[in-house]
Each structure stands twice: as structure tokens, then as C-alpha cells.
Image (tube, helix red, strand yellow):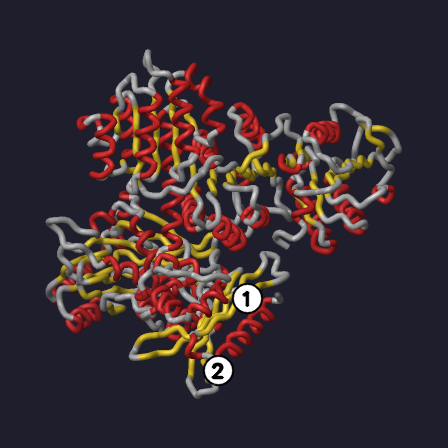
Amino acid sequence: MSVKYLEHLFKPNSLAIIGASRDENSVSAMLMHNLMSGKFLGPVLPVSGAQEAIRGVLSYVNIAALPLTPDLAVLCSSAHEAPEILADLADNGTHAAIIMDPHYALLESVERAAVDEKIRAVVKEKNIRVLGPGSLGMIVPGSGVNASLSRVGAKEGRIAFVTQSDSLFESVLDWAKTNTVGFSHCVSLGSQLDVDFSSVLDYLGSDPATKAILLYVETIQDARRFMSAARASARNKPILVIRPRRLPCRLRDAAAELAESDIDLIYDAAFRRAGMVRVDDIDSLFEGARTLANYKPLRGNGLAIMTNGQSIGLLTADTLVDGGGQLARIAEETQLKLEDILGQERCSDNPITLPYNATADMYAQVLSILVRAKDVGCVLILHVPFQGAPSVDIARAVAQVAKTSRCLVLANWLGEETVQSTKDIFDEASIPVFDRPGRAVLAYLHMLRYKRNQQILMQTPDSLATDFFPDTNRAAEIIQDALAEGRTQLSEEEARLVLAAYGVPVVETRICKSAMQAVDAASEIGFPVALKIRSPQISHPFDIGGIALGLTTPDLVFEAAANMAARVHAQVPNAYIEGFTVQKMGRRPGAHELFMSVFTDTTFGPVLRFGHGGVAAPVINDQAVALPPLNMGLAREFISRTRIFKLLEGSRRQTPADIDDICMALIQISQLVIDVPQIVSLEVNPVFADDKGVLALGARIWIQPATGKGPDRLAIRPYPRELEEHVRLKNGDQILLRPIRPEDAQAHLAFIHSLSEEDLRLRFFGLVQHFVLDDMPKFTQIDYDREMAFIATHMVDGESQTLGVVRTSTKPDNSAAEFAIIVRSDMKGTGLGSVLFEKMIRYCKSRGT
């Protein structure tokens, strides 16, 4: 249901408390107290089973006795009673409820599962939204709603906080009160039987009162819904997320076979792919909240530091650079302006050092120059309370400049006394102020990471990603034959054939049953060769001397095979030797050894892994993970998160590797696991990479019968190739109708430039002066789960041209959709508009919209 009826939850006009009690220590008493103190203006209707006054409010015997239908009901009774109560509420017209049973978490797992199942059944049948069970409730200060069990209220603000943790719900509210940070929403999700992260993110993403979102995440239930909602929201407003790297046993997925560190890497990749910023500790979350409360988009990547204490400025600059940030370059024109105020010696470097006793007017003048400098993305002011440096006056002058600037300004007034005396001044001017320079830098780095994540999402990838044509039938046939034989793993030769079917360059290989066959095979493919023993009982032949490299003659091949067999019989007596693998030595002097692999997570589905390869890979532990599907831009960002990436880029002594070829291999493997759902995991190690490209040497693939289509198991819906179709227009031209792709950016820009001013005005509801390539990602990079754009294309001189586009955006609950059509001005009268319209109608019907 996504956002359906969430208005009743977060903006109720009336509210009922089911299970109300006169006991001052009861859950309902605390709830009543919070509702009264929250200044909720609508009627509060206690239902207690008796007609009595509770906190001066008349209570009612049962739901049927209520004088009106409440928008929201809060259940303070046992969770066991919740299914029946929810059904009664829904039958009475109530669309939202919160289940607050504090004993719910104490139920045994079997008993809790039975209660959960009954609640889910009512939610599905009766169309009622439920927050909880196990929720502490929620607070919406703007609506005067404090339907929570928190002992601390919340000030109205622009940050939404959504959490799975009761203790963090309390802690953040307590911290916010002390630091005068306000919230638009504070939501304790509980067990997420209905209202979950996805639902709340969809709601908050379009909520005008919410400018930024904080999440505390432990587990995700529906990865695709979460990713879709998170990506949509993160494009509109910053999202900070915190997740513990270790979870208690009760919260871990019992079906998961991965190490906890691997699972955390997956969550990290998911957060990054969604455009969110992950923080590692509570302090970072708080500092992020402080900055987000006054968020202004960063204009550039450089930080300007101005201070009246040189050493403080230098140490802070070190903290910035060590954290991955960079100092803003002070352009010559900016230096000249600063010289008039500070003199030549003080304005050439960043940090910009003011005199220790600089006046308020000097601070204001310098800040005015820096916030207008084109290379400055943010300004951090560090003020040391020297004698003769009026801290309060300086704060007022700084606040006056910052109020009218579009540049983000951060402040650190050192010294407890000065912090307290200036706090109100900075709060009024929406300037984040910090008690230590390091915390200010950390907050800035969070904003920088958010900006970079958004740039990654919105960049225009190269068109290379679609220029390969896999032999899907061949790969599927090999795997199906293996499954028919009852196997769960392909042979090395089969694995290489599957990779080759998807265009991954693989080394020439022969499978042999005996030493003599190995000799013959080596002679056929040419020396030198590598030899490896084959045995189902030996997963790592290198460890027992089961691999020989660089064999240059038939005699050396035969001798190596005999020695291997002898070692195996001695060290692993029960091992069955199937034979030997002979490979052409992929001699690539100076090539880097990489690995590429795929494993399957129970929540996020297939996950890609990349890093430093070879036999030492586990020791080196240089790896990154990413979620499929990939394009060239995402693949490059993926590999850039490894240490070996710097080596791949080359140096004065080493030629750069063909990084495009590495990215292409990852895209091909990504497409393989999308197209062939029988693949459970895959490992290619080593992969040689140099300026000549990549070459895969070792390959292993594990399989099992598929239970659904390949794209269905991904956390992010891939390009829906099945929606492509060829159509003939009235004029006889044949065109291709297909979903838009990120790689269409250049062609789409050319299409927009071909439109007349009148067509542009009608499409965009006003005269659009000029579009540039940087504007295209918002048109071409879409979430196929919740929006669609079909383009009509045809080939001209070997290049694809866009003739028209129909675009639709579907509500998260799939209840309705909006669409727009535009065709190239010279294509009017060809029937293209009708073709696009009919295509979109068929698509919406297929979705049940």
C-alpha cells in the first residue's frame, strides 16, 4: 500500500486510545500525557471499557460507542487482542493504527510469529495501516501530535528521524532537546508488519515540511521496495543512515550463510547506491543532524577555513584532508579582494588567517568575499576567544552575512562560555555551530559524501555498456544440462564456456582424464602451459601443490601430473582424481591479478564483488561490493573503492590498465546473473588486467534450479528488455519502441534541441531556454519500478536517433499515474504520438495501475 492512508497516521484530525486506563503508570496514561502536552487540537477519544473520565476526558465503552470515526487509533492493550481490535476499527472506517504493547518484545518467537501473522491478515483484508507492534509511537510537532511513549517531546523542525531502535528514539529526542534541534517527524517503526522504511520514506520524500531524513536501520525486509523508495527520496533531500556493523543473534537472518562483515558490506553498497550517506556512530549522526537542519547544497568540493588562530586552522585542515576532503583553492581574483582587507601575507593560503583581534566588521567583509567565491563550496569559521576579539559581536556579523548567502557556513566558537553566548545567534541564522573543529569537519564531510553520491547516481555513463550481445541460450543450455545431471557446480571448462558466452575473455583450456591426455592437450594449444589437478574433494589445489605453472615441454607436463597425483594420494588419501586441467599460459608481464565474483544474499539477492586477486586475495583483503545491474559509470565507481584501483590507473613507471575493459567484464558478469537465475554464486580468479584488456584464468560457478525470473531476485530492477518492440508508422518507417536507458543521454539532448520553442513550452509548461548534458540524467536515469519512459528510435547513418518519448510516473501505491508525450516536430502526422500513447496504456494496464 506504500503511502496509502499515511496522512491519517501522520496528520490525524482525531485520535482514539484503545485500552485507556486511569492507572497513572500505564502506557495509556503516558500517551494521554504526551498528547495533551503536544497541543493536539483534535478530539482525543479514550476507549476503556467503562464510561468514566480519564485525565478529564470522557472515555467510551467500546469502539462502536465512539461519537465519530477517528483518523488514528493507538492500541495500548495486548498485541494478542490487536487483530480483533484492528478489524473493528477498520469496519468502523478508521484507516491507521499504532500498536504499542510494551510486552510484545518479550513474547517467545513462535508466539510472536503467530500474532504477527494474524495482524498481517487483518491489514491485508481490511485495508488499514499499522505502525508496530513494538513501536514507541511517533511525534509530528507541526501537527501537535505526540502519540509516543517518549518522556521527551520534540521541537518543530525540518528533520525527520525514523528508527528501529527504541533506545535511539529516546536518545535522539533527548539530545535534540538539549541542542535545540527540531523535527518534522520522529517515528519508531517497531516490527514493521505494515508501515516500514519504504512506506515512511515514500511519504517523507514528498513531504514539504521535511528537508532531510535520518535513519537508524538494523534489517531491511523488502530490499527492492526499500531501494526504490530510498533512491526516490534521496534525489529530493539528504538522507543520513546509521547501522550497527554487528547485530545480536535474534536480529540476524537465520537463512543467511554469509559472514556478518559481508552482510554489512552489502548494506553499505545498498546505502551508497540509493544516494544515502552512511555514518558510523551516534556522534556522527548527531553532527549530521545539526548540519542537515540547516542544509544548503554544496556548490563545490572545496572547504574554505577562516580563523583568527593559525595553528587551529592548520590542524583542522589536516583533519579535513585526512578524512578525504579538500581545501578550496583561493582563486587569484579572490586573493586580490582579500588583500585589501588582510594584507598580502594572510590571503594567499587556505586556511585564511585573520589577526587574533580581528573586528566583527573584518569577519563580515572576509566572509562576504568567500561565500561569493566560485571555487568555495562551504566556509568553516573557527573563532578563538582572544582578549579584544568580541565573540558575540563577531557572531552577529557572521550571522548577518550567512543569512543572505546561498553558501553553506559552519561555525566553531572555541570555549564553552563563548559557545553558549552565541548559540542563539547562530540558531536564528540557521548556521550549524559545533563545540570542536573536528566535529564541524565531520559534518562537512557527510555533506560532501551526499553530494558525491548524488553525482554518481546522476552521471552520464558511456554507451559502451550495451555494445555486447550475449549468447544467453548457450549459457542457459550448459547450466540446464548440469542441473539435469543432478550437479550443483559446473566444471571449470563449463564455467569458462558460460563466461565466454557473455563475452568475458577466457584463457584457452582443455579438460583431461590422464597425464598422457594432458601432454597431448598441451602440445595442441602450445607451450608454455599451466597444469591443475581436478578433484571434487580439493577446492584449493594450490594449497597441496596441485598447480604447476610455466611448463614448456611434454616431459615437464607428464612429470608434473605424476607428482601432483602422488602428492594428492599422500595428503588427501580419500580424494578422487578426475584428471587435470591444461591451460595456455596467459603470459601478461606486469599485468595485475584481480578477482570478480557473485554471491547471493537472502535480502538483496545477487551481489557483485571485485578486488585484488590471486592466491593471496584473502590475505590482502582488498575488495568492494556492488548491487547489479551496472553501467559503465557505476562499474568504474565500484572498482574505484578498492586499493588496487590506484595501480590500475597507472603511474610514471607503469602503463595504465584498460579500465573500460575491466568495467565491461563486470557488466557482462552482472548481466549473466540477471539473465540466468540458476546461478547462485560465481568466482573468476585470477583475472589478468593490463593495457591489453582482461583475461580470465580460473572460473567456478555454482547453480541450483530457479524459482523465478532472473530480474525478480535483484534489489534494483534492471533494464526491462522484454518491453522492447518494433513498430511501423503510417509513413512506412520502422521504429524501435523501448524503455529509456542512462546511455541515451546524448541522443536525448539532441532530441530536445530538435524541438521547437512552442513544443518545449507545451511540454515543460513554460519557455525553456536551454538544456545541457548535465540536465539529462534526470530524464534518462529512472527507477523502472515506479516510473517509465518509452522512446521511439531509429537508425540514421549508424547512429540511433530519438523521435519521441512518452513518460509516466506512478504513485507508490500504484493507484494512479501521470503521463506526458512529446514527439519531434518533424514527426507530427506520422501517428507516432498515438503509438507512444497506446504503448504507455498497455504498460500501465500490465502493472495494474
Question: What residue occupies the far top of the structure in this picture?
Answer: 387
Q: Quadrant of the N terminus?
A: bottom right
At numbered mark 2, what does the secondary structure look like: helix, strand or loop? loop
Task: Locate residue 243, reporting x and y percent.
Answer: 47, 39
Name which residue type carries label 1: Phe
Taking the spot 54% from the left edge, 42% from the top edge, the residue there is: 210
Q: Which mark is residue 247?
A: none
Q: Which mark is residue 829?
A: 2
Question: What residue occupies the far right of the structure in this picture?
Answer: 51
Taking the spot 44% from the left edge, 45% from the top edge, the residue there is: 276
Q: Is residue 401 visible?
A: yes
- Which image quadrant for residue 634? bottom left
- Which image quadrant for residue 351? top left
**Residue in the foreground of this view, choosing between 560 and 623:** 623
Q: Is residue 497 visible?
A: no
Are there few (<14), some (14-19), or many (20+) residues within 10 Å of tag 1? some
Task: Locate residue 291, reporting x and y percent.
Answer: 44, 34
Taking the spot 69% from the left edge, 29% from the top edge, the residue there is: 34
At numbered mark 1, what does the secondary structure look like: helix, strand or loop? strand
Task: Locate residue 795, reporting x and y percent.
Answer: 35, 78
Q: Nearer the viewer, mark 1 or mark 2?
A: 2
Name which residue type carries label 2: Gly
693 on left or right of 217: left
443 on left or right of 254: left
Are there few (<14), some (14-19), or many (20+) residues within 10 Å of tag 2? few
Residue on which disc 1 sits: 819
Task: Tell me whether the residue at label 1 lies in contact with that at label 2, contact meaning CB atoms closer than 8 angstroms.
Answer: no
- Spatial CA distance of label 1 from label 2 is 20 Å
473 on left or right of 25: left
Q: Quadrant of the C terminus?
A: bottom right
For marks 1 and 2 on the same chain, the one whose residue lies earlier in the sequence: 1
